[in-house]
Image: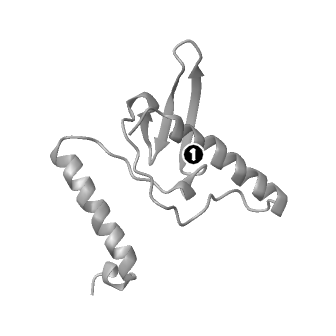
Amino acid sequence: MHERDKWPKIVRIVVICLQRVLDELRKRQLSAVCFDRADFPHSLQLAAQLDTEQFHWQGSFLHQGIHYRLEDFRSIWYRRPGRSYTFTAGLSEAGYQYARAEAQRGFEGLLRSLPCL
């Protein structure tokens, strides 16, 4: 039995749908990056600045050792995330809530503000 066969049916459907989308993008020679927001800020990093003259974001998105330029993002497929952000152990509850709110506003806010479909 394949490990994927043990997953709940809804998870299998999402994975199969995602794989079909990725296959089609590759067939059209378009690049794609998949990530889980829970990887931020540990294994997924973002450095950005706002160009106030042309009013657009410039920066770098680092995921699994690969740099992606924010200026190159053309579309974002945002699914319902299941896991929340992970932070350094030892944060108080107030510290965790603050870090989570900042990550949502900063990281997700920046991605939502990109000129993407």
Picture quadrant of residue 87: bottom right
Q: Nearer the viewer, residue 35 or 57?
A: 57
Colour scheme: one colour
Quick one: which residue is furthest to the bottom in this view? 1
Residue 30 appearing in the image: yes
Picture quadrant of residue 106: top right
Q: Position of residue 23 (x, y in %)?
A: 21, 55
What residue is rendered at 54% in x and 19% in y?
55
Q: Nearer the viewer, residue 106 or 117?
A: 117
Q: Which residue is mark 1?
A: 108
**Which residue type carries mark 1?**
Glu
Q: Position of residue 40 (x, y in %)?
A: 58, 51
Q: Is residue 26 left or right of residue 64?
A: left
Q: Is residue 79 left or right of residue 88?
A: left
What residue is rendered at 48% in x and 34% in y?
114
Q: Quadrant of the N terminus?
A: bottom left
Judged from the image, the secondary structure of the residue bearing numbered disc 1 is helix
Q: Tell me if mark 1 has few (under 14), some (14-19) or many (20+) residues whose alpha carbon lies within 10 angstroms of its own.
A: few
Quick one: which residue is furthest to the top in this view? 53
What residue is rendered at 61% in x and 61% in y?
84
Count of residue discs:
1
Q: Position of residue 116 (x, y in %)?
A: 41, 36
Residue 92 appearing in the image: no
Q: Quadrant of the C terminus?
A: top left
Q: Position of residue 113 (x, y in %)?
A: 53, 35
What residue is rendered at 52% in x and 61% in y?
81
Quick one: which residue is furthest to the front in this view? 117
Q: Is residue 87 above or below residue 3?
A: above
Q: Is residue 30 above or below residue 12?
A: above
